[in-house]
Amino acid sequence: MIVLAWMCALFFALAAEATPARASLPVLQVAALAPLKPAPDPAQVIHGGMDDRFTRSLSTHTPNAVETQRWYRLTIDRDWHEASSPVLNFTGATYIRITVYAPPDYRPHELWFAQTEELARYSRHHLALELPHDLRAGQPIYVQIAADNFTRQIRADITDMASYQAQDLTHVRLITLFSSVQFTMVLAAFCLWLVLRDRVLLYFIGYTGCQLMNQLLTSGEMYELPGGALLVPLGTHAPWLFIALSAPLLLSFILEFCELRVITPRPARVLGHMRWPYFVIAALLCFPFAERMHLLASAYNLWFIITSLWALSTVILAASRHGRQARFFLVAWLPQVLLTVLRLGQILLALDLPRWLEYSLPFATAFCSVVVTIGLADLSLRARRERDVAHHLADHDALTGLLNRRALVARLHEAVAQVRPQHQPLALIFLDMDHFKSVNDRFGHQSGDACLRAVAEAIADELRPSDSLGRYGGEEFVALLPGTTHEHAMAVGERIRRSIETLQVHARGNTFQTTVSMGVASLMGANDTADDLIARADAALYRAKTQGRNCVVAHSPLTAMAG
């Protein structure tokens, strides 16, 4: 919660800086040249040979055209007298090449979103070019916008260098914040996957990684990173491909993480089928004709809206049925899906992208990644607790809570292998309750169970934390005492015998006592095994039974030969 609160505070602080107070600057005026075939010679345009054919536009938007380039003539309404140089910048020119011919020499300056040849002076938020500080009113700036497969509205603007750099720096901070958060969450999920090998973590890594790649490509920051130049030939295919692949991975993650197949089986089945059209769209986007198909992009956007709303309603249904993970995901994903729907609506309606939506969407994506990672951590902790409980139940007796026979024998083999090279002592006490059958016959099996638990606690109270105690059979117990000599083991056995002899067992309104017989054996030589140790302790226990019970008998080679 502290991390989320910090993210929110930092986002709103930086977003407030993203719109600096703009002073009264000269107004940019735009005039357009009608598309011509063949395209006019650049030398003819920049030398004023076609100035009389430019038509004044009431908007600063400069639409590019399909199949042919467009020319624009930009001027300012008064001389530039600001403290810093003017900066001409273009918004919405993603993957469209723009060539600017600016005074005084009117040399061509190519602005290109995926440019990697030169060291970038600004971020790729806008395509920008610094103009002469002495720019005069009416002095023309010629702009050539390359043909594109989609008709787009590119906005031209002019501002002073100080304001532009401040705004650009804030943009870089925001994008770096969002991208860093997402990358950190992907890295954390990958570390969890290395430990747990859970499929749901792979889905999270896949869809979050694709969303991060799309965000870096859309902002242009990917081309600043090592290897980014390899994606330049893909052009608009690259972001479309990653966003198309992220959608089915996201739906798969929702199905697994929110346990929708268990909680909401029918809606989950429909949601599972909704994934497959995305793979078809992703495959089609790899072909060159995809750039020329408005229908394909619109179909993807519309299908994404439909599947997102269906997934959201299914998650809400699962949360209403007490799905813990669904509630986690609902809190994380609801802001993102609503903002995504607004963004797609803005694209489909060809509206300007408002600044609050431009930064709110990547913020919501980063927020979703953090909350979902917390949910994954919670899921992993629950899985670990369940695994620990399963391991405990597999190694411990359900009635007494002591080690079961399998775990006890394994512990004994480990202890023998550990003390034998170091020539340390090891003792074993084999215990059997006297006349236990009569307890069950007289007081009932529930009283017998209570007696077993009471005896187990009494034995454990006389042992050290390093000793091991287990239930070997019905009323038989075995205590493993590493580092204990034969004489000390006999003393421990005698303490246990006296403790149980005076033990008062209360069960179902009855009070009764019991006793135990014990056999003690110690590790004797280098060739001695765990099975030999158990056999000798069992033989000593048998002699304790034949000698009248409620006693401790030690095994020795002499008594073994006499037997």
Image (cartoon, rainbow, N blue to C red):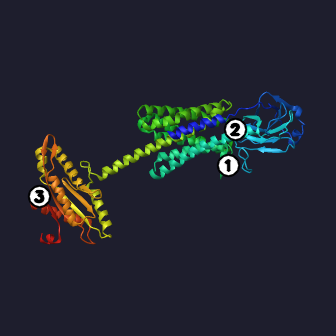
Q: Is residue 148 visible?
A: no
Q: Nearer the viewer, residue 106 or 244?
A: 106
User: Which residue sits at x=31%, y=67%?
Assistant: 419
**Amino acid residing under circle 1:** Glu
Element type at mark 2: helix
| C-alpha separation, residue under disc 2 versus residue under disc 1 | 19 Å
Farthest top residue in view = 58
Q: Nearer the viewer, residue 369 or 293?
A: 369
Q: Quadrant of residue 541?
A: bottom left
Disc number lying in front (2 or 1): 2
Along the polypeptide, which appears first: circle 2 or circle 3? Answer: 2
Task: Residue under label 2, please give it.
Answer: 167
Along the polypeptide, which appears first: circle 3 or circle 1? Answer: 1
Task: Residue under label 3, please give it.
Answer: 549
Q: Quadrant of the C terminus?
A: bottom left
**Amino acid residing under circle 3:** Arg
| C-alpha separation, residue under disc 2 versus residue under disc 3 | 91 Å
Q: Residues within 10 Å of mark 2 (few under 14, many from 20)?
A: some
Residue 523 in the image: x percent, y percent? 24, 68
**Amino acid residing under circle 2:** Gln
Task: Residue under label 1, please give it.
Answer: 224
